[in-house]
Image: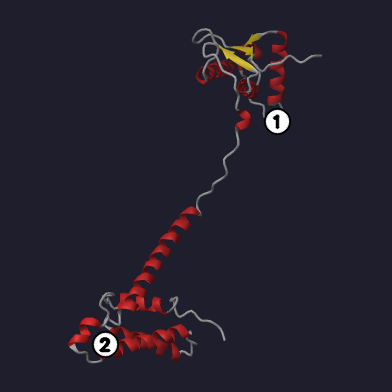
Amino acid sequence: MYEVKLDAFNGPLDLLLHLIQKFEIDIYDIPMKELTEQYMHYIHAMNQLEINLASEYLVMASELLMIKSKLLLPQHEEEEVTEEDPRESLVGRLIEYQNYKEYTDILNEKKAERSKLYSKHPTDLSHLETADTWDANQTIDLTELIIAYQRVKTRMDYQKPKSVEIRKEAFTIQQATSIVNQKLRVNQSFNFFSLFTFKEPVEHVVTHFLAILEMSKSGLVNIEQLNSFEDINVVRGVNYQIEKS
């Protein structure tokens, strides 16, 4: 014995809803004769195909026949007033099942939309927080630093040779940081442009630029500019410590 899903229906209520929609039947005023005939026609068709019907389909068939027979029985006027409509229970179950189907479609749509998204847990950045305060008069914003970077890059564009040598560049942020530390070990501050001879590859300038940004973020250096468009000075920061030899 094995279970068979009848066509595309998930149980007798699903089949009844299909028939109601197909024949445009008012679900609140079901003509039981027509609905029962269509349902039984479907059941007989399945029997002819030798498909084992689930018991719930047969139970529903007997329920439909019972409701149909009650409606066919003659009723007295007093009974018509007090007796409930035998279709009422079936209508309630069909409406409830129809609502469940609609909710299922909505949830499946939301599931499909959500499957296209990827989320991650928030990153803990508490270790980057600091209680140190920065003097706005002693520092410059990122815009000024970018302008200085563009000035260095422009000078290099004028002086670089026309031919291009393709090679692997091994200059790292750690090396650039070491050069900055060497200068700060000797002097309290130094001119940003003194890091370059303007003959280096542009990668060296970018690496120095990134190294100073990282050191500034950690409070190892401050970046100062006395007036707009003047040279930029790199100064020891609040967290800078001279290594003892």
Position in image of residue 47 (x %, y %): 44, 90
Question: Residue farthest to the right?
Answer: 245
Q: CA distance from mark 1 to mark 2?
A: 91 Å
Quadrant (top left, top right, bottom left, bottom right) of the N terminus: bottom right
The residue that label 2 is drawn on is: 71
Is residue 210 rendered to the left or right of residue 37?
right
Position in image of residue 78 (x %, y %): 19, 86
Kind of residue sitting beneath label 2: Leu
Position in image of residue 161 (x %, y %): 62, 19
Of marks 1 and 2, the one in the foreground:
2
Q: Which mark is residue 50?
A: none
The residue that label 1 is drawn on is: 168
What secondary structure is marked by label 2? helix
Sequence-wise first label, 1 or 2: 2
Total marks placed: 2
Q: Give the residue displayed 46% in from the left and 54% down from the top.
A: 113
